[in-house]
Image (cartoon, grey):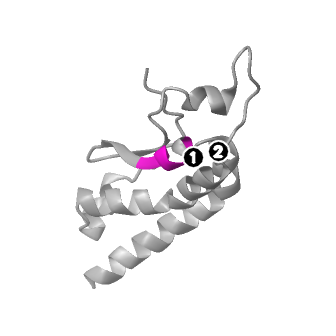
Amino acid sequence: MKAIVYVGDIALDRFLKELAGLDAKDLEGVALQAVEPIRSQAEALAPRRTGRLARSIESRVTKSTKDEIEVEVGSDLAYAGFVELGTEDTSARPYLRPATDANEAAAVAALIRELDQKLGEME
């Protein structure tokens, strides 16, 4: 069982890509940088017995089309979702939702900053 807790997606319209002349790899890099504050805090907040869950938290591009880039932050560990959401027998110990809630503004700021930097490199 693959347990990835979905955090969100970042959609960039086609016009921006054409206007900026940025290719898909540049935009994927921008999107990954934008969610880094979320990934980093989720790693810090993850409960630690062995540290395996914290070490497994990553961000990755899951969809990249001409109109949209989707990025997920989470873990592939089978038990990651159970830790985040709890089970009938164990209480939830959220780490992804609090990291997302606390860093939404930072992620948007990082997205703007990274796009600005990429656009500046093109001048």
- Residue that label 2 marks: 48
Say what secondary structure mark 1 lies in: loop
Which residue lies at the image location 30% right of the left edge and 82% below the top edge?
Answer: 121
Residue 40, position as x, y percentages in the image: 56, 58
> Which residue type does callout 1 highlight?
Gly
Q: Residues within 10 Å of mark 2 (few under 14, many from 20)?
A: few
Identity of the residue furthest to the front in this view = 50
| 57 magenta-colored | yes
Image quarter (top left, top right, bottom left or bottom right) of the N terminus: top left
> In terms of depth relative to the viewer, which is nearer, 44 or 8?
44
89 lies left or right of 10 = right
| 43 magenta-colored | no
Q: Residues within 10 Å of mark 1 (few under 14, many from 20)?
A: few
Q: Residue 69, can we see it?
A: no
Above or below for 5 versus 117: above
* Residue 51 numbered tag: 1
| Residue 122 position by quadrant | bottom left
Residue 81, position as x, y percentages in the image: 58, 29
Which residue lies at the image location 49% right of the left edge and 28% below the top edge?
Answer: 3
